[in-house]
Amino acid sequence: MPYSAPRPGSPFPLGAHPEAGGVRFAVASSIADAVELCLVAEDDDGRQTEQRVELTERTFGIWHGVVPGVTPGQRYGYRVHGPYDPRRGLRCNPHKLLVDPYARRITGAVPDLAATRGYRGDPMSGGPSRIDSLGGVPLSVVTSPGGPDTGRRPDVPFEETVVYELHVKGFTKLHPDVPKHLRGTYLGLAHPAVIEHLVRLGVTAVELLPVHTHADEPMLLRSGRHNYWGYSTLGFLSPHAGYASRAGHEVEEFRTMVAALHAVGIEVILDVVYNHTCEGGVAGPTLSFRGFDAPAYYAIDDEGRDRDITGCGNTLDPGSPTVVRLVVDSMRYFAAELGVDGFRLDLASALGRPHSGAFDPDATLLTAITTDPVLANRKLVAEPWDATGEGYRVGGFGAQWAEWNGRFRDGARDFWRGGTGLRDLAYRLSGSSDLYAGRRPWASVNFVTAHDGFTLRDLVSYDHKHNHENGEHGADGTNDNRSWNCGVEGETGDPAVLALRDRQARNLLATLLLSTGTPMLLAGDERWRTQHGNNNAYCLDNQTSWVDWSADPRADDLLAFTRRLIALRASSPALRQPQFFDGRPTRSGEPDLLWLRPDGEPMTEQDWFDESRRTLGMWIDGSECLSRDRDGELVADDSWLLLVHSGADRVEVVLPSERYGRRYIPVLDSGTPRGLPKETDPLPPGKRITLPGRTTVLLRAPRVSQ
């Protein structure tokens, strides 16, 4: 149908919004000479046609208008007329149909790479491509506001949070209790059988790998592969359609998933990629941002090329008002309208580097996020590095940020493979005050595994990566794994090797969940998941990446061990305190934290510099811990003695004197499959006990009144 000329409308908010018998469209481009809205239809043969409507109103560099008669469900794109001058980074080309950067639904894929290129020949010296991309690019879709209620936010205190990092598709794709049509979808994650697993495990938040609409990079398309992880964003306000069980229902199903998790007290944190887009470098496709106003979106050098501090070909410029507005609007939409409880910002250091320059924790974009009234009440987690040395900023973000603590990962791995002494481990166990002084211990998001790298099983089974399935001849993925195969590379039937691997996995999990800070688990680790030594499975949408739910006695034992650890943490306020230990005296007359040698005596300064030491005791006085209940009242706890021993040989340990506890009750032992101590009778002060090689033991010292 022909549409009437648009009425002016207003420029904000950006995107497509139904109103007054039509839809108001608004899109930013400060360099355009003209912008055409293209309303797309499809005939019975699947051939796409379009009707172009020129947006003549321009306010603040935003082209806008209300088009009467347009309704939700309408597919559309834009064509931008303007300068094409690659040496200045200007790449307007009206032959390319562009996705709305503010689209709340995106449909379709890229079937024809040639049609997406905005240039002929060389991207810097050739002229603009004359190939029309209609039919060869994704389309934006007008959506109605609202949808299913997302429920009441759990608002779990950060110090009580246990994060579980998962992939929406991979987590349920093989789940036998989820109906086949729901496996790998938002509704699959909302299924009662999946919710039950999360609740029984005890996690308080799921951190979802990217769920923004993403598109495969040309390299992957040419080889018939896909970006499984999703770190290749096309639409920052649209949930990825590939995770919907019914085409076109991704927004509703996303909201339903959030509501199901909220109903059982589990928060939803999104892994978001605001540092680059799927368009890659100058030789990449023109799908959206590049065609609207490349210098307003990307950091561009003096020759018109993309600056790349992300390792992905381009870098969104956090110094640009256009980018600041897009990022904050995207986060606010998912938080306020889709119910999301927090965000983990991928390569967040790049967001603190305006124009790809020096890092500034008070940079415009980071400040805009933390001062936004909606986002300030959400959990904000930074991945504090990018692809450059300048970007490694662990501990360098502002007061409102938690951070992935890569030094915890490295320190825990090094200690348990026998490669380091005790100093660094002590910092990690006690909350990393060397990195986060001035903040709270929960600012340290502790992890030993994540999507990027080995799984827990592979960490104790491989010395080297095995990434041949990726099709890059093993050149991808880090070589710095700090792993140990326990004597045999890869799978083996040797009972001694298998037993050692199980023990090492339990040691790593115990270190993670008994440390002060915010623990993060990788989904499937508790089920002994393997990627067969692949430490970069970003393009493997297959059983290598999917969680295996089949019955396995070793997986059952590790699951029980993990549940036990999380339950211990949840019920023991002293093990998850919201403030750092500082040696303050408690009502017991002893300091809040004491480090002990195997002989039961306090560590001396000289002891800390003895790199041969592999045994450490950590005594936490719970009589005056600084955890609080929901009413803000301080809560008392028992005291705890954590013993870690990474040496290969057994060691004799003396329990502390009666000053620290009248009796010590074993509650966890990494030497048994499920962590249950072989003996649970109380032990007297000063008793000598033997720790086998590579063991973690936790003992409880009850309060005097007990």
Image (tube, rainbow, N blue to C red):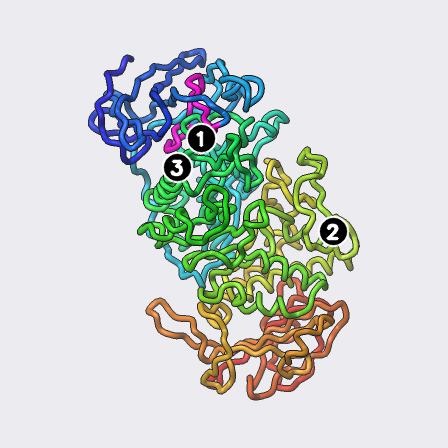
Judge by depth and name the residue closer to the eye, 450 or 568: 450
Residue 103, magenta (yes or no): yes
Q: Mark 3–mark 1 contact, CB under 8 Å?
A: no
Viewer-nearest of labels 2 and 1? 1
Farthest residue in the front direction?
302
Which residue is identified by label 3?
237
Q: Which mark is residue 463?
A: 2
Magenta-colored segment: predominant secondary structure:
loop
Judge by depth and name the residue closer to the eye, 368 or 690: 368
How many angstroms separate mark 3 from mark 1 (CA)? 19 Å
How dense is the environment of label 3, judged by Cα within 10 Å: few (below 14), some, or many (20 and up)? Answer: many
Which residue is identified by label 1?
294
Q: Residue at x 57, y 60 (%)?
A: 562
Q: Which residues are magenta?
A: 88-106
SS under mark 3 = strand
Mark with earlier residue (2, 3): 3
Count up the numbered dots: 3
Q: State whether residue 617 is above or below residue 547.
A: below
Left or right of 20: which side holds 433? right
